[in-house]
Amino acid sequence: MSAALTVEGARDKESLSPLAPPAEYDRFPELSGTPAHNVAHLYAQIVEALSGRDSDAPTFEHAVELHRWIEAIAAKATAR
């Protein structure tokens, strides 16, 4: 199952409202609104990372850090 991703923002005490990312950030505008849109961006990041170019793709180190955060949260939750 896949869901469309949205970006929302607000200032001060305003309610959140949708924000449109700049058009130049979207490498695959023809896929916009489809589940393939997000997957295409992820695959592009993986290709960049594997080819040695700068990439925002998550690394193994990111996974380890996230796992540690989850463990710390779980430990705090069960300590109560």
Image (tube, rainbow, N blue to C red):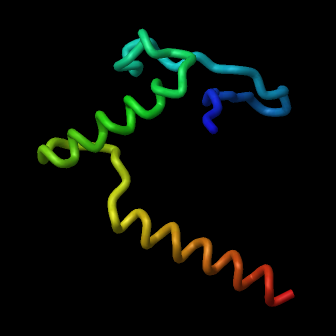
Q: Which corner quadrant of the image does residue 39 belong to?
A: top left
The reply, left or right, for residue 31 in relation to residue 18 is: left
Image coordinates of residue 48 in percent, x first then y, are 21, 40
Q: Position of residue 34 (x, y in %)?
A: 54, 20
Q: Residue at x 47, y 31 (%)?
A: 38
Q: Nearer the viewer, residue 34 or 17?
A: 34
Instruction: Judge left or right: residue 20 versus residue 24.
Output: right
Rendered view: 12 above or below 74: above
**Point 84% across, 27% down: residue:** 15
**Which residue is situated farthest in the bottom direction here?**
79
In this rendering, is residue 59 above or below 21? below
Identify whether 11 is placed above or below 76: above
Q: Is residue 71 left or right of residue 18?
A: left
| Residue 79: percent from left, percent from top | 80, 90
Q: For residue 80, which quarter of the picture? A: bottom right
**Residue 60 at x, y percent in the picture:** 34, 66
Q: Quadrant of the N terminus?
A: top right
The relative height of residue 76 versus residue 62 in the rendered view (above or below) is below
Residue found at x 35% / y 68%: 61
* Horizontal relation, residue 50 to residue 8: left or right: left
Report which quarter residue 56 is drawn in.
Answer: top left
Q: Residue furthest left?
A: 51
Instruction: Give the tally of numbered discs.
Output: 0
